[in-house]
Amino acid sequence: MSTAFTVVIPARYASSRLPGKPLQDIAGKPMIRHVWEQACRSAAQRVVVATDDERILKACQDFGADAVLTHVEHNSGTDRLAEVARALRLSSDAIVVNVQGDEPLIPPAVINQVAGNLAAHPEAAIATLAEPLEQVEALFNPNVVKVLTDINGFALTFSRAPLPWARDEFSNEPSALPAGVPYRRHIGIYAYRAGFLADFVAWGPCWLENTECLEQLRALWHGKRIHVDDAVEPPPAGVDTPEDLVRVRRLLGAPA
């Protein structure tokens, strides 16, 4: 039996590295349309774009997307998600998948996977995904978020720092990953239950979340469990910078 879920795509206009990012053209379409189309190829019952900007709202309406205008003062995409869940009057146990608005190549299979994983783990408040980390440079890159899980696949913690720290192997300048250590990169797609989203927003940020700039740490701080599975199809990197935009345009056969 397939899992019933709603996809919400938060899309902000402001971006320090790439202003107006959701509306950047890729192969003749705004980036947000590529994300929406990929989400529509999943098994979601409904796909909604949540934006704080009239320009993005109009663009979405022009290509037929279900889109809502949210408050501008939200600190995170999760806050925007919670507002949408309230506006849609979703039941407390309804599953909501957060697909980032800068992931034009997100595979529909991973959207289905993360929703199914949450449904299969009622003890979890959140489900998310990861993939093996295979390069030592990525391990030491603070822009690559690392995740460490327990034997049952529940997150112990997330960090921008190398995690876990191989004491002996890293005593000198590391040139390779230590053998036998399952380093994993976190993939930023999440499934939540609508009732949990309301709690998450009510708690507000904690010091650990603020220190690492990783909002999933708020859930761990409050004792909630996060299930992590390896993605069935690791998604290509999203668009954070102008260089990323050039790369994705080339992948989709458009002029850079």
Image (tube, rainbow, N blue to C red):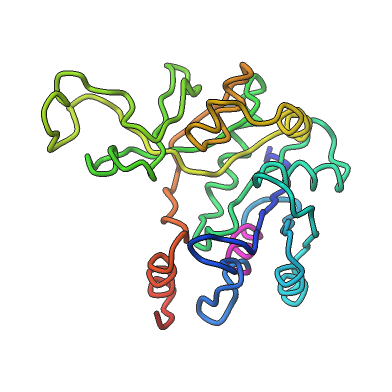
Residue 58: percent from left, percent from top:
76, 73
Residue 124 image-quadrant placement: top right
Q: Residue at x 36, y 34 (%)?
A: 184
Rendered view: 255 above or below 226: below
Residue 25 image-quadrant placement: bottom right
Rendered view: 242 above or below 85: below
Residue 163: percent from left, percent from top:
33, 27
Residue 41 image-quadrant placement: bottom right
Q: In which quarter of the image is the N terminus?
A: top right
**Is residue 240 rendered to the left or right of residue 96?**
left
Q: Which residue is drawn at 73% across and 65% down?
A: 53
**Is residue 1 rendered to the left or right of residue 244?**
right
Query: Taken as a whole, is the magenta stretch helix, strand or loop?
Result: helix
Q: Residue at x 43, y 68 (%)?
A: 242
The verdict on residue 36 being magenta is yes
Rendered view: 152 above or below 212: above
Q: What stretch is highlighted in magenta?
A: 33-41
Residue 157: percent from left, percent from top:
46, 24
Residue 156: percent from left, percent from top:
47, 20
Q: Observer-nearest residue: 122 or 24?
A: 24
Q: In which quarter of the image is the C terminus?
A: bottom left
